[in-house]
Image (spheres, grey):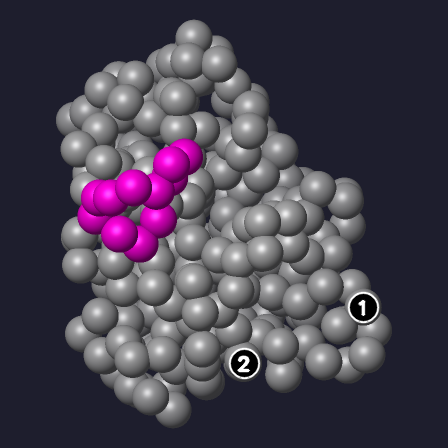
Amino acid sequence: MRKPIIAGNWKMYKSTGEALELVRQLKGSLADVDSVEIVVSPPFTALATVAGELKGSNISVAAQNMYWEESGAYTGEVSPLMLTDVGCTHVIIGHSERRQIFNETDATVNKKVKAALKTVLTPIVCVGETLEERDLGATMKVVERQIRDGLDGLSPREMEKMVIAYEPVWAIGTGKTATPQQAEEVHHLIRSIIAQRADSVAQDLRILYGGSVKPDNVDELMAQPDIDGALVGGASLQADPFVRIVRFKRK
C-alpha cells in the first residue's frame, strides 16, 4: 500500500522567525503521526533553520526549486548539493508558478529531475493544465506531454524514487478545486502513462493532488484510489489547517 504524502508549499511567505514558530507548532501537533509522510517547503532563507529544528522529527524538508548544476557561475541559483547541505531531502520541481512566471519548460524540468536524483533528493515533479487548456479539452494531452518530456531518459529505478503532483493551474490560489472525480481521472491517466514505461513503478508511484486543498475537501480527495496525498499551498501556512489535512480521514 502506498504511504500518503502531505507536503506544504509555503511559496514566498514566512520570515525565518515565523517559519521557526510554525514548524515548532507542527512538530508538537504531529509527533504521533507515522502513517503519513509529512513534508514542509519553506523559502530558501528559512531552509537551514527549519531543517535544524526538524532534525530527528517525522517531518521532512523540501526546497521549492533548484538549478541542475552542482556549482558554477550561475548568479542567483541554488544547487542540489547546497540543498542537501542544509538538510533538505525533497525538492519541488516544475511548479506551475515556475512554469508560468519564470518560463520553465519540460526540458528544464527534466534536467532538474535528473540532477535531484543524482544528489539523492526526492523530486516532487509538478504537472497540470491551465483553464484554457482544460476548456479546449486538452488536459490529457498536456499532462501526457509534461510527463513524457519531463521524465525523458529516466530509468525505472530512477522513477521509483520520485513523486508526481498533479496541480491544475486553474485551481491554484483561486479557491477553485478540481472535483475528486476530475482529479482522480487525471491521476489515473498519470499512472497509466507511467505504466507504459514501467508497470511495476506505476503501482507504487505516489501521485499528489495540488490545488486549493483545504481541511474541508481533503477527506473526499484522499478517498480516490489514485490520489496518494496533497501538495498544499495556502492552507499550509497555518498550523491548524495543515494539521487537519495531515490527519485526513479516509471515507
Q: Which residues are magenta?
A: 67-77
Please report the residue visible at 48 percent of the width from the left and 14 percent of the height from the top: 15
Q: Position of residue 42 (x, y in %)?
A: 43, 29
Q: Is residue 27 magenta?
A: no
Element under label 1?
helix
Q: Quick check: 99 left or right of 27?
A: right
Q: Position of residue 211 (x, y in %)?
A: 64, 50
Q: Is residue 74 magenta?
A: yes
Please report the residue visible at 56 percent of the width from the left and 24 percent of the height from the top: 13
221 and 157: which is toward the camera: 157
Q: Position of residue 12 (x, y in %)?
A: 55, 29
For disc 2, the neighbor class at 10 Å (few under 14, some 14 to 19, many from 20) is many
| Callout 2 amino acid | Glu
Asked whether the viewer can see residue 8, the reply is yes
Q: Position of residue 73 (x, y in %)?
A: 29, 41
Please report the residue visible at 45 percent of the width from the left and 77 percent of the height from the top: 149
Location of residue 135 by image quarter: bottom right
Location of residue 72 by image quarter: top left
Mark found first going from the N terminus, 1 or 2: 1
Q: Main secondary structure of the magenta part?
A: loop
Residue for badge 2: 144
Please report the residue visible at 54 percent of the width from the left and 42 percent of the height from the top: 232
Residue for badge 1: 132
The reply to whether discs 1 and 2 touch (Cβ–Cβ < 8 Å) is no
